[in-house]
């Protein structure tokens, strides 16, 4: 049996045309760089594929995020794929739930190196010179409740068999369940490699044979943190001898949790923050980094932090800027608890104990009712009944009242940190 040695790139979930929702960056120039990153990451992947001298590229679904607004996204994909065509590199394309046949109906003619998998039944493409055969089935519609893998054909003897499939396997929350199947459904097939798509997190589900989710090429929001890219698969004498991640993301999302318990002042807090940022900045390299910062812990500064949030946001961004020029605050989450602090109760006046008054007010059913009514009114004006009018605060009302108490007490104390 002759099977050549070769390499290929396995990518998935490009989500070209994906809107960058929910990224509340203050600077529109920075926001634009994050918005452009999805396309730039794919350009980088094509460059890396050419540089690696890979023999072909497999894209396991969700090239497009949805129906095209106009043809610009299709023109972009054609332009990049044409670079591979001119280098003689075939590209195998499968449609996933986001770019199923019934979802993306517009099209642009693509170069001759592109081979798409049929949606009606599994289809096999053969690369005779390499002794490779690829089996796959595209999504006809967004919702595919069937186990597609089960109907994939048996392996072709004497060839290196690759299964290409867009699937949630037995479930990968928060990803929707599509084309469900078990790991065993795949491993019993007798293929040499399973090129999966759909799950946006890199995962080597199985090693012999390799069953791999490459993850998406570019994180698009705070739920998609860390490095992103594709996989370069090396095959020697018919066996996978190497899996190498090709990290191509052009902008990155990350979370940082900081226990500010030991901090007694703003300078303390900023010193702690800057030290924690250094390793993060090193890991992200030259990329812009959107950072969600959560401050936690039991701190005497709690009330001050809550009362001075706007200024704190700017101080945090300034600390980012001192460490590295391209870190941006995506969101500041204050999740701090109070500790007993003698200095936090100066409002306990002899004649007028404000803390007692605040305590009474917080427990006053009238205040609660007024708050609920105020927000219910707001809720009625929102589209799609976003708030439950009967209990618009849900379980957050107690927490909000506690925070309001802390803010008010801090304002009255007039203390500086
Ligand atoms: Mn998908």
Image (cartoon, rainbow, N blue to C red):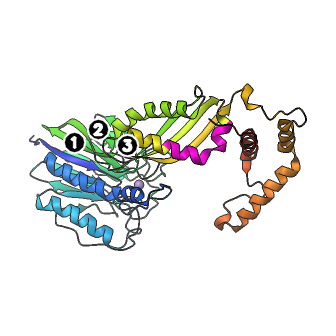
Residue topped by disc 3: 185
The secondary structure type at the circle numbered 1 is strand
Q: Is residue 254 left or right of residue 314?
A: left
Q: Depth-wise, is mark 3 or mark 1 nearer the camera?
A: 1
Residue at image coords 64%, 33%:
301
Q: Which residues are magenta?
A: 303-316
Q: Which residue is pictured at 72% across the width and 66% down the height?
A: 380
Q: Is residue 215 left or right of residue 374?
A: left
The alpha-carbon separation of the residues under discs 3 and 1 comes to 22 Å
Location of the N terminus (image quadrant) = top left
Q: Is residue 233 visible?
A: yes
Rendered location of residue 406, percent (x, y): 73, 39
- Residue picked out by circle 2: 210
Q: Is residue 305 magenta?
A: yes
Along the line of sight, the residue nearer the viewer: 94 or 392? 392
Can you tell which quarter of the image residue 342 is in? Answer: top right
What number is the disc on residue 322?
A: none
Foreground disc of the pair 2, 1: 1
Q: Are marks 2 and 1 in contact (CB under 8 Å)?
A: yes
Of all residues, the one furthest to the right in this rendering is: 351
Q: Which quadrant holds residue 33?
A: bottom left
Closest to the observer, 189 or 400: 400
CA distance separating discs 2 and 1: 10 Å
Residue indicated by mark 1: 233
């Amino acid at each position: 049996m002759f099977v050549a040695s070769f390499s290929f790139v396995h990518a998935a979930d490009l989500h070209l045309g994906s809107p960058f929702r929910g990224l509340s960056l203050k600077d529109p120039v920075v926001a634009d760089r994050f918005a452009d990153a999805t396309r730039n990451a794919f350009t980088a992947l094509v460059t890396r594929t050419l540089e690696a001298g890979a023999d072909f590229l497999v894209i396991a679904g969700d090239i497009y995020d949805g129906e095209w607004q106009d043809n610009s996204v299709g023109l972009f994909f054609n332009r990049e794929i044409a670079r591979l065509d001119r280098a003689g590199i075939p590209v195998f394309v499968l449609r996933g739930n986001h770019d199923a046949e019934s979802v993306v109906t517009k099209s642009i003619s693509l170069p001759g190196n592109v081979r798409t998998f049929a949606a009606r039944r599994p289809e096999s493409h053969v690369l005779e010179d390499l002794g490779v055969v690829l089996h796959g089935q595209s999504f006809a519609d967004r919702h595919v409740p069937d186990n597609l893998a089960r109907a994939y054909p048996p392996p072709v003897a004497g060839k290196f068999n690759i299964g290409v499939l867009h699937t949630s396997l037995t479930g990968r929350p928060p990803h929707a369940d599509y084309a469900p199947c078990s790991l065993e459904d795949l491993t019993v097939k007798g293929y040499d490699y399973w090129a999966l798509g759909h799950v946006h997190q890199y995962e080597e589900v199985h090693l012999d044979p390799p069953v791999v989710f490459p993850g998406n090429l570019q994180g698009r929001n705070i739920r998609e943190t860390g490095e992103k890219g594709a996989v370069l698969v090396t095959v020697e004498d018919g066996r996978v001898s190497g899996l190498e991640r090709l990290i191509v993301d052009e902008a990155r999302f990350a979370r940082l949790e900081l226990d500010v318990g030991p901090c007694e002042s703003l300078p303390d807090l900023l010193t702690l923050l800057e030290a924690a940022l250094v390793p993060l900045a090193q890991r992200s390299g030259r990329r812009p980094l959107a950072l969600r910062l959560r401050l936690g812990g039991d701190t005497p500064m709690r009330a001050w932090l809550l009362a001075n949030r706007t200024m704190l946001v700017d101080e945090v961004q300034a600390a980012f800027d001192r460490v590295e020029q391209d870190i941006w605050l995506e969101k500041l989450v204050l999740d701090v608890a109070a500790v007993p602090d003698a200095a936090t109760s100066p409002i306990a006046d002899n004649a007028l104990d404000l803390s007692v008054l605040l305590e009474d007010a917080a427990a006053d059913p009238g205040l609660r009712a007024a708050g609920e009514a105020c927000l219910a009114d707001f809720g009625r004006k929102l589209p799609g009944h976003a708030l439950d009018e009967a209990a618009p605060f849900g379980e957050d009302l107690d927490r909000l009242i506690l925070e309001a108490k802390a803010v008010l007490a801090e304002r009255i104390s007039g203390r500086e940190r």
